[in-house]
Amino acid sequence: MALNGFIDLRSDTLTIPTPAMREAMAAAEVGDDVFGEDPTVNLLEEMAAERMGHEAALLVCSGTMGNLVALLTHCERGDEVIVGDWAHVYVYEAGGLAAVGGILPHVLPNQPDGTLDLDEVAAAIRPNNVHYPVTRVVALENTHNRMGGAYLTPEYTSKAAELAHAYGLKLHIDGARIFNAAVAQGVDVKALAQPADSVTFCLSKGLSAPVGSLLCGPRQFIEKARRRRKLLGGGLRQAGVIAAAGIVALEQMVDRLREDHANAQVLAQGIARVEGLHVNLAQVRTNMVYFDLDPLLPFDAAALCRRAAAEGVKMLPVGPRRIRAVTHCYVSRDEAETAAQVIAHAVQDWREPAGQVNVHAY
Ligand code: TLP
C-alpha cells in the first residue's frame, strides 16, 4: 500500500484519493457553486453540518483557508484571538490572521495534552478599556498536531465554550483531524464540535480526499463566511468534482481511522525499543508519533530522516532532534512494523545517508 514506493509517514496529507473517490469524482453531478448551483457541493455541505451538529457548512479549499475565513468572519481588524503557541493557525498558516485579517494573536502556552489552561485563558481576556484590543475569539485545535496528536475531550471543549461565552467571546475549533479525536475517544464527533461557534475539519488528511475542508457554524455566520471565502479567491465553480470525493470520505473513511491509531501504537512501540530514541508512549493517542533523538547520537533528525528515506521510509524532521511520523490508510500494520525496523536499523548501524531523497522539514 506504499505511496510512490515509500512507506510515507511524513503526513496524512499525502494520502491520495481512493478508487471509490475517483469513481465518484468522475460521475459527479456539478454546477456553478458561486451561484449555489452545484448539487454535490450542496449535499456535502449539508452532510458536514449534520455530522458536526451545526446549522450550516461551507466547503473551502484547505484547512488554512477554513481557519482564516472563520477568523475573518468572527473578527474586525485590530481584534484579538487567544491561541496556543503551537497552534497550527499561529505557527503554520503563514501569519494569515495578522497579514490578511489585521488580527492579533494573544499567545498562551499549549499544554502537553493540547489544551489551553482555562484559568490562563480567562486571565488573558482584555478588560473593556479603550487602550486594549477587543478579545473576540478563543481558538483551539483538535486533535492537536504539534502536541503529538493529543485530543480534546467533550468535557474540556464544553468548559472552554462556557468560558468564552461568559465573556461574550466565540470559540473556534481547528478540527482538521476532529474525526481522529472522536474515533479515539469513542464519542460522537458532535460532542466535540457542537459546543464551538465555528469548527473546521479537513477531508484531505486521514480521510484521504484530495482537496477540501469544511467550515461549520450557524447559518448566518456561514453566509457571512461565504463572502469572506470569495474575497480570498475561494469561490469555486464546478467544485462538485471535489465534493464527490469528500462525500465518499465522510461515508467510508471515518470509522477506519481506528486502524491508523492502532498502527501508530505499533510504530511507537517499535521506536520506543530503539536505544537512543525517546518516545512518550502515553502521548501517542491518535495517528501521530513524535520522537526525539538522544543528545548522544552522532546525527540529527534531518540526517536520520534522509537515511530512513533512502531505505524506503519517509518521516518529517520537525526540530533539530525531533521527528514526526504519521499513520494513515496507505500504511498497513505490516508497514508500520517494517518502518520501525528500518528506523532501528538506521540508528543501530549508523552511516551517512546514501543518495539524496527530499523529505522536507516543518
Ligand atoms: N497540517 C500539515 C502541515 O501544515 C503541518 C500537516 O502535515 O500536518 N490545522 C491543522 C491542525 C493541520 O495539521 C493542518 C495541516 C491544517 C490546519 C491546514 O490544513 P491545509 O494543509 O489543508 O491548509
Image (cartoon, rainbow, N blue to C red):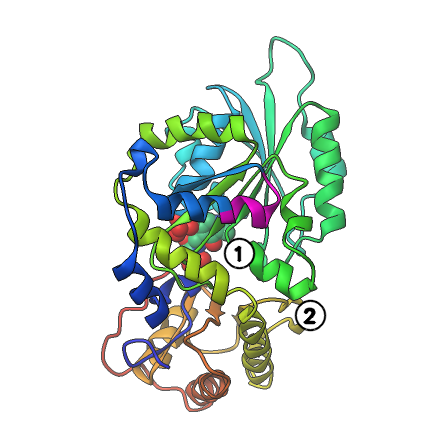
Q: Residue at x 48, y 72 (%)?
A: 327
SS for tag 2?
helix
Q: Nearer the viewer, residue 22 or 88?
A: 22
Q: Position of residue 89 (x, y in %)?
A: 48, 42
In the image, taking residue 347 as reference, residue 276 lies left or right, namely right
Q: Position of residue 188 (x, y in %)?
A: 67, 56
Q: In the image, is the residue at mark 2 within 8 Å of ligand 1 by its beta carbon?
A: no
Q: Position of residue 152 (x, y in %)?
A: 67, 53
The answer to whether residue 195 of the structure is visible from this angle is yes
- For residue 208, above or below residue 90: below
Q: Amino acid at mark 2?
A: Ala
The numbered dot on residue 177 is: 1
Does the magenta segment cover residue 79?
Answer: no
**Few, some or many residues within 10 Å of mark 2 (<14, 14–19, 20+):** few
SS for tag 1?
loop
In the picture as drawn, the residue positioned furthest to the left comes out as 355
Residue 106 placement: quadrant: top right
The answer to whether residue 92 of the structure is visible from this angle is no
Q: Residue at x 53, y 64 (%)?
A: 254
If the image is split into quadrants, where does the N terminus sit? bottom left
The mark that comes first in sequence, 1 or 2, is: 1
Q: Amino acid at mark 1?
A: Arg
Does the magenta segment cover residue 48?
Answer: yes
Range of residues picked out in magenta:
47-54
Residue 18 placement: quadrant: bottom left
In the image, taking residue 134 as reference, residue 95 lies left or right, namely left
Q: Nearer the viewer, residue 190 or 124?
A: 190
In the image, taking residue 135 as reference, residue 167 lies left or right, namely right
If the image is split into quadrants, where does the C terminus sit? bottom left
Q: Nearer the viewer, residue 195 or 282?
A: 195
Q: Which residue is mark 2?
A: 282
- For residue 176, above or below residue 278: above
